[in-house]
Image: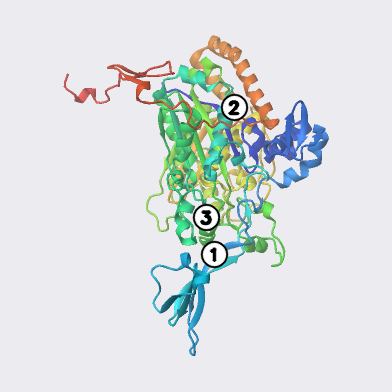
Amino acid sequence: MARLPVIAGFGGINAAGRSSGHHAYRRMVIDALAPAQVQQTYHSLAALTGRLSKQSGNWIDAAGDTVELDSYIRQISESLDQGTLIRRLEQNLFDPAELLYHKKAKLTPASDDSLHFEIRRKDLPSPVPPGWVVTETGPDKKDKLSVRVTDSFEVMFKCTRKAAVNSAGQLPTGFDPALLYPARNHPRGLQLTVFAASDAINSLGIDWEVLRQKVAPDQISVYAGSGMSQLDYNGYGGMMQARLIGKKVTSKQLPLGYAEMPADFINAYLLGNLGTTGTNVAACATFLYNLRQGISDIQSGTHRVVIVGTSEAPLVPEIFDGFATMGALADDASLRELDNLKSDQDPDFRRACRPFGNNAGFTLAESAQCIILFDDELALELGANIYGGINEVFINADGYKKSIASPGLGNYISMAKAAAATRNIIGDEGLRQRSFVQAHGTGTLQNRQTESQILNRVAEAFSIQDWPITAIKSYIGHSLASSAGDQLAASLGIWSDGIIPGILTVDEIAEDVHQQKTDFLMQHKEVGSEGMDAVIINSKGFGGNNASASILAPHIVEKMLLKRHGSKALSNYKTVNESVKENTAAYDCAAMEGDNQTIYRFDHNVLGDDSIEIGESNISVDGVSPKISLQIDNSYEDMCDE
């Protein structure tokens, strides 16, 4: 029997806040929470953004003044609201009103004269353009040259422009991951990786050293990456731009730009991992592609612990330009048109993303999300928290295409398979009455038509009526590779607090949306913490990358563990889990006091050749008790001579 991948920890960061402890999820449904939870959510945001910390037993604000906790939280709650979720793009990343570009021009000397100017010696172009006569300016100006130009020549004028798109799912105002560890000019996506992976590891409530001494090094895998690579100036963006804007390429820009670098950072600077590693790049479906790789490792029994993650930091002018030129983004002009606003009026940036309603395009966002999976036996033995379980992930391509960005048939197949796999676990009634869908729901015209048709057709095939559909991109935007990670983190929150987030940015479902068998939630839906047995997470990526995942609720996972391992094992598990819960709560408390406990171990316990011993049957590594077995199964035994 296949081992069950159990979600033992999760963490991350997006426009709603910190993922662990369900804080980001609660920001989305804050208007439906009890007052104590509302206060706690704002408290988490205040600590995350540096506006609140605990020092020597006192609560201190950003100015260093002592404050009374509850009254201070109430005082800043409105600004915390405004500094989260989708909103007007802030200027800490770049100034959208002053975007730099260069305009090419041709200069021609006047017909009755040549053109004269002076230039610094080090700025003289090489080779010297035709028609330039260069002379020394004199002994008093040794660093200057005199230039007389008789022919036409081209120049590039430094100009600025205003961005056409000013809405984004930006991280909470005041949160700066570079301040949490020695960032050393790391690309922003890697800074987010360090925070997200640290958050997930700390959320375990189990010291990682315990895992290292329990699980052989080759039975731990990490699959994490980004869809767009690292395209800000500290990554590939700078490598491509530097020479063209008069700067030098650095030695870090190329290596730190790779799409799999989030996995590399987790291995090298957080875990010291010696196991399997890599990433599957699949545009907006990248998280689920990595998740499929991870659960295959656990189901097959080759691995016992897997970290799955993605990190995307696409809020750079060039990526905005690329998607806007495709007509994929909701630009300001289109938003004004939707709401019948005048050209001099600001659009409603908070409602920029409107899945399945009358919409204008998707809203770009940044996010990093990580989950930690244990096999079911290890989860029971170590008393791991059980946030849910991964049933299956299905991936299908679209077949022949006219446009590489247009949808095809693949998502029909992946969604139908995910529904069938869900039915295998919770039965027909469970699928029909106690499952819901986290739709890809980008907020584009094409998505609302095609995805709604797919969901409706699958619901019809399985005799589902009023299948609940939500789309959390309406809150936090589209983080590309990390978008399904955002959806998964929110789903875990639903099993904690029992509220499915509604699509609140939509006044009405668009007429061309197929909804005969589905219920697109325009308000929060209270279902109770055990009201839903499973969720299907849907993800669609450019190029025909379709993935749909069947995720099981924690109460369903516990029932499965009871059936496989028996009541005694489950009772022992609950006893061991008490201390794990306490450790998880202690981390959450520390984070809410301003101590994020970010993990970054640069040049830490680096092992050399003398740290490994290779024998005929196993490999030993210094500092790690479990050995790596060399008793490798022969998959082709029936084809080999004895």
Which residue appears farthest toward the bottom when viewing the image?
112
Q: Mark 3 or mark 1, which is nearer the start of the sequence?
A: 1
Instruction: Please state which of residues 336 and 89 is positioned toward the viewer in this rendering.
Output: 89
| CA separation in Å, label 3 and label 2 | 33 Å
Q: What element carries label 3?
A: helix
Rendered location of residue 420, percent (x, y): 47, 34
Instruction: Please state which of residues 41 and 95 is positioned toward the viewer in this rendering.
Output: 95
User: In the displayed structure, does residue 44 sit left or right of residue 535?
Assistant: right
Q: What element carries label 1?
A: strand
Q: Please give the residue where the numbered disc 1 appears in the rendered image.
A: 101
> Which mark is on residue 319?
3
Q: Is residue 391 above or below residue 460?
A: above
Which quadrant would the N terminus be assigned to in this image?
top left
Q: Is mark 2 on a helix, strand or loop?
A: helix
Rendered location of residue 267, percent (x, y): 46, 32
> Which mark is on residue 235?
none
Q: Residues within 10 Å of mark 3 (few under 14, many from 20)?
A: some
Which residue appears farthest toward the left when viewing the image?
641
Q: Residues within 10 Å of mark 1 (few under 14, many from 20)?
A: few
Q: Mark 2 or mark 1, which is nearer the start of the sequence?
A: 1
Instruction: Please state which of residues 167 and 194 is positioned toward the viewer in this rendering.
Output: 194
Amino acid under label 2?
Ser
Q: Contact (CB < 8 A) between labels 3 and 2? A: no
On the image, which quarter does residue 553 sit in? top right
